[in-house]
Image: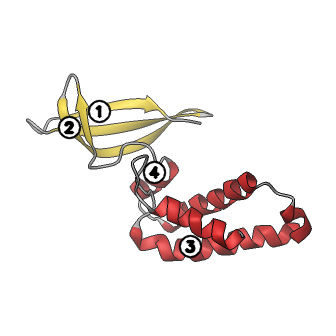
Amino acid sequence: MLDEMIEKGFEYWFTDSKEFRSPFPMGIREELKVKTKERFSEWINTMGKEDASKLEDSELVEMFEMFMFNVGISLCPDLDEQITITYPFMPRCGDEVDDKKHGLSFVIQREIIDIEKEKRQMRLILETQSDKKSWQTEFDLPA
């Protein structure tokens, strides 16, 4: 049962859909699978089979995903790839943005800004399609 859940989890996060694009670069996926399975198995083994059998499916999925995302971030030396994994539903470099003031633009850079202890923002630097002028915007990120 756990093996099936793990494989479905990888399939879900590695497959682009209407709701989101996979945040995991192709080049890390095989190593990500191996290391995530190792860490998840270690976690299960440390609590013992009896305690593990008492966990709800949602708890298992949550822990699996936590391990997968943490391992994924550790496997990516590129900061932009780390941002994609950390915030998989946010705009990415190359994405189109149709802004009322600036018109059709493309994300050319992004960064995370720490505002306060528990508050972060994403800064997007964009380039307009029409005249290649740069502009930027910031917005709050989910906690």
Residue at image mark 2: 105
SS at badge 1 = strand
Disc marking residue 83:
4
Q: Amino acid at mark 3?
A: Lys
Residue 27 falls in image quadrant: bottom left
Q: Which of label 1 and label 2 is nearer to you?
A: 2
Q: Earlier in the sequence, mark 1 or mark 2?
A: 2
Disc marking residue 70:
none
- Position of 70 with respect to 47 (left or right) is left
Numbered circles on residues, count: 4
In the picture, which quadrant includes the N terminus? bottom right
C-alpha distance separating marks 4 and 3: 20 Å
- Image point (87%, 59%), residue name: 54
Residue 44 falls in image quadrant: bottom right
- Position of 72 with respect to 16 (left or right) is right
Q: Residues within 10 Å of mark 3 (few under 14, many from 20)?
A: some
Q: Amino acid at mark 2?
A: Ser
Disc marking residue 136:
1
C-alpha distance separating marks 4 and 1: 17 Å
Disc marking residue 33:
3
SS at badge 4 = helix
The picture places residue 49, in percent across and down from the top left corner, at: 87, 70
Q: Earlier in the sequence, mark 3 or mark 1?
A: 3
Q: Which of label 4 and label 3 is nearer to you?
A: 3
Q: Residues within 10 Å of mark 2 (few under 14, many from 20)?
A: many
Q: Earlier in the sequence, mark 4 or mark 1?
A: 4
* Picture layout, residue 136 above or below residue 47: above
Q: Amino acid at mark 1?
A: Gln
Q: Earlier in the sequence, mark 4 or mark 2?
A: 4
SS at badge 2 = strand
